[in-house]
Amino acid sequence: MEKKGTIYSKLLKIILGTYIILAILIAGINYGYARVAPQNIASIINWVWVVYENWIKTAFILIGSFLTIKIIGSSKRTTMRKTNLIGFIIAALTIHVVTPLLVTNYDLYFYAMPLPWTTTPLQLLNTNSALYQSTITSWGSNGILSALTFFTAISLVVLIGTLLYGRRFQCSTICLFNGFAAEVFDPAIPLIGKPRRIKPRTLRFINILRWVFLGIALFFIAYWAIYLLGINITPNSDLITKIETYKYLVGELLLSLFFWIAFIGRGYCYYCPLGTVLSGFAKIAGQKINTNNTKCIQCNKCNETCPMSIDIKGKAINGKSVQDIRCVGCGHCIDECPTMNLSYSTKFTERIKSKKTPVQIVKK
């Protein structure tokens, strides 16, 4: 079994490495050369990008999830992590395969993340934007309608899901930007070397970075909202589009890939603007890690396995619940706890649990 586990781990690293190389190469060509390439070449590049983002990515998620389940399957408790993987598989099949085929619009994945993560829906409402022109050319007016409808549906699903199940719903179940990689490729991350804990000084810097990225995201939203009202802050909106594209390529795509290669899978989750906003809704939902189900034996396994550097043990020692803005609800700490002391809950899940729990009648 140990030999098989080693083979599965090597295969998973190979798949992750392939995914990273393809992401850098294809994204670079699509966002760089395709803009100045002849029309026939640009069409081929766009086709390769669509195939990669939809079907190849889904195949990686399916195969990676299978290998990860095989690797962690010998553990006594893997309930939370297996649920995560099942969620990502369903999300990938829905967003990258089934829905695009149904509406014949293979760019829908651009609209699978709610505001403030991207402003593509706002750009699509502007008939003068480059995004509108490329979409109308590739998919027609029905493509624009399907994209905006899809974005609205996804946003509502994420909002309602977070209010019911906390940040876990998006970040550890359906996020197809960074969340899926952190779970699907977890045993293979980092690609080089051993997993490294983020130091306190670095953590303080990233905490500041979180609010900086949120501020930048809100700036782009405000710009496009004002632009749609007919107020031109800059004479050339294409400049803002380019800046936002570079922000995505450098601050999000390349930096998240760097974390997968050298540190931890959840690196980008520390400062994701959508995650920051959802943490506020998660607080309203009453998201928390309960630490009083049995007894904390101070083994520190919860802290060691937490990808968001949260001090869970410090709370568990005194039986206090963990309610941290960084918590993505992945449940790694819950599966890892040897005494089954930890559990994840929200107001909604506690209400459901109380209804399922039979009332005990004490006989006199």
Image (spheres, grey):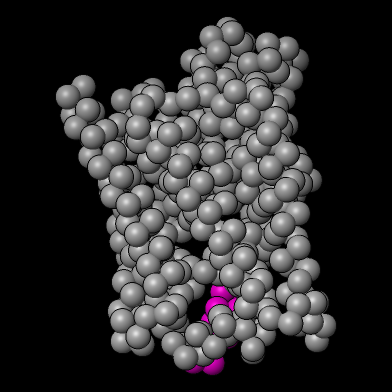
Front-most of 274 and 361? Answer: 274
State the quadrant of the C terminus.
top right
Residue 54 pos. (x, y %): 37, 66
187 lies above or below 245 = above
Residue 342 pos. (x, y %): 59, 23
- The residue at the point 44 percent across, 52 percent down is 88
Magenta stretch encompasses residue 78: no
Residue 6 pos. (x, y %): 22, 28
Quarter-of-image position of residue 258: top left
Magenta stretch encompasses residue 143: yes
Numbered-mark total = 0
Q: Is residue 43 in view from this perspective?
A: no
Quarter-of-image position of residue 64: top left
Front-most of 337 and 292? Answer: 337
Quarter-of-image position of residue 244: bottom right
Magenta span main SS:
helix
- The residue at the point 47 percent across, 91 percent down is 137
- The residue at the point 57 percent across, 51 percent down is 251
- The residue at the point 53 percent across, 31 percent down is 307
Residue 333 pos. (x, y %): 54, 26
Magenta-drawn segment: 140-150
